[in-house]
Structure formats: C-alpha cells, structure tokens
Amino acid sequence: MGNSRILIIGATGYIGRHVVNASLAQGHPTFLLVRSSTASNPEKAQLLDSFKSSGATILHGSIDDYASLVEAIKKVDVVISTVGAPQIADQVNIIKVIKEVGSIKRFLPSEFGNDVERNHAVEPVKSMFDLKVKIRRAIEAEGVPYTYVSTNCFAGYFLSGLAQPGLIAPPRDKAVIYGDGNNKAVYVREEDIGTFTIKAVDDPRTLNKTLYLRLPANIYSTNELVALWEKKIGKILEKIYLSEEQVLKLIEETPFPGNIFLAIFHTIYVKGDQTNFEIPSDGVEASELYPDVKYVTVNEFLSQFA
C-alpha cells in the first residue's frame, strides 16, 4: 500500500495534533489547513513550527474559505477533520468540496468520542451528537467514501482525573461516582488515538465503516478504576455515589460549559453508552485490526501518577 497524502483540518486542536504526529510518524505526506490567525497564537505557532520541521506542509486557509479548501483538497487523497464542536456543522463545506474535486479516497469527519448513533445523551450534548449524525448522513448521501472513528474516552481528560470533572491528577481523598459505578467505559491515550486513526486511512477493511477503539485492556467500570487506583496508592478513598436523578439535576443547574462535561459523564457513566452494545456489522475494532499497535493500558497510564 502506498502512503496516501493526508490533509488534516484542525491540526492544532486537542486531538488534531496527535493525528498530525501519527501521520508524519507513519510516513504520510501530511498537509495542514491552517487559519492565518492561528499563527498569531504563540503556543500554536510553536506547534506548527514543530510540525513543519517534521515534514508537514502548511497550507493557509480555512473550512469557511471555499477557494482555499478546494486548493488544499486537490493536493491530497485523504481528508481528516478534527475540528471542535463550534465547527462541526461547517463540515458540510468539506463534503461539498470533496464531491466537487472528485478524487478523495477517504474522509474522516470529526467524531473522536462516543458512537453518536448509539447513545442516551441529554442536552446540551444531545444536539451536538445529532449534528454529527447529520454530517454522517450528508457524507453518505453524497457517496463520499468515509471512516468514522469512535475513540471513546480521551485518557488525558477522563482517566488522569479518575473520571472526576476538572481534575488533572487522580484524587487521593474522595471520588464522586456517577451512577452505580458498574457501567464500563473505554480509555484511550491521545497518542494511541492518532496512531489507530492513521492506520485506518488506507485500510480497505475500514472503508465505509466505523472504527471502534474498544481496547480490551482499557475497558473499566468506575468502581474497578477506583479500586485499581486505591491499590496503587495503598489507600481507600471515600466514595460518593450520585444517582441518575442527582446527575440530571446537576446538569440542569450547572452553567455552560460545565453542563457539557456533566452531560457527557451522564451518557458514559450513568447510561454506559460506550459498551452497552455489540459492535455492529458496519463496525470494526481497532486492536483486532492492528494487533501490532502497543497501546498504553489504563494500568500503565495510572502508574505515572502513583
């Protein structure tokens, strides 16, 4: 398999940077569509410099600038979007241009979370998921070849704080547990998300399929997670369980953007939406397809904090 030329839109974002690094590491000619304003942010400018020195080609433009989008998409075989929530709807522009250019072998829209078609989400997350479903339907209606990537939980967000909103290291005194703590979630390190995503771009087995990152060593209930952490630090935490009713009330009372995190916690932990279904026939599991990828396990990830 020759390495496809890849365009990444949203390259300096939270997950985008890991996709860029993986694309470069796996030897793909890598192009990044970057707004001119991005370069005026010192942290992002530094990031772009490091991408450039690793061999990425920077193209100036944006998802809203049709001409620049056409020029960028003409240069590549695969388009990956990692844009954030405010730009999910704007991906219709990408679909339109891919259709117009006519030579794109694969489009990966911005997903990178729960399976948006199998969930019990409440607002404000429900409408965000619905928007992603709308983008899926638009891709399919235009006959654009695709792969959807369902990564489940970003380890840096969810695991480093032991599923406690706002924490960046696991707690050593008490843990708040959403629901009964028995629903299992899946935690994936961001670098591994990048690796699996890029592995999939040229793979015929992932064409017009959803790639699920349901990594066997990383499927844990909150109760199991807390027990693993307690063992590592040799200390029992105080546990506070919140019923679904309490979680829903909390979502209602919490101002934006805190309510988004709580609503995501509700779908993952109270409803168990990452593991409460079998992988469907139009889905494939990443670690089964790529057994050579040595992903970081939950156990290894937590050890760095212990």
Image (tube, rainbow, N blue to C red):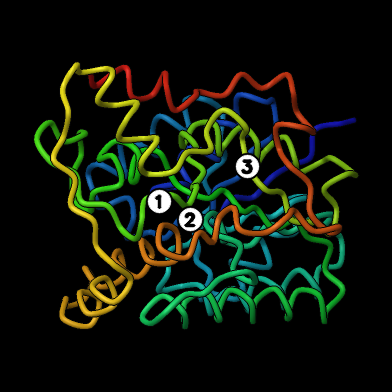
The mark closer to the camera, 1 or 3, is 3
Q: Are marks 1 and 2 in contact (CB under 8 Å)?
A: yes
Q: Position of residue 125 (x, y in %)?
A: 41, 75
Disc 2 marks a residue whose amino acid type is Gly
Q: Quadrant of the C terminus?
A: top left
Disc 1 marks a residue whose amino acid type is Gly
Q: Residue at x 36, y 80 (%)?
A: 124
User: Label 1, label 3: how many angstroms apart (C-alpha)?
Assistant: 23 Å
* Label tally: 3
User: Label 3, label 2: how many angstroms apart (C-alpha)?
Assistant: 24 Å
In the figure, 157 relative to 147: above or below? above
Q: Quadrant of residue 93?
A: bottom right
**According to the image, label 3 marks what residue?**
214
Q: Position of residue 192 (x, y in %)?
A: 54, 31
Specify few, some or many for label 2: CA neighbours under 10 Å numbering under 14, 14-19, or 20 or more: many
Relative side of 254 to 123, left or right: left
Mark linked to residue 13? 1
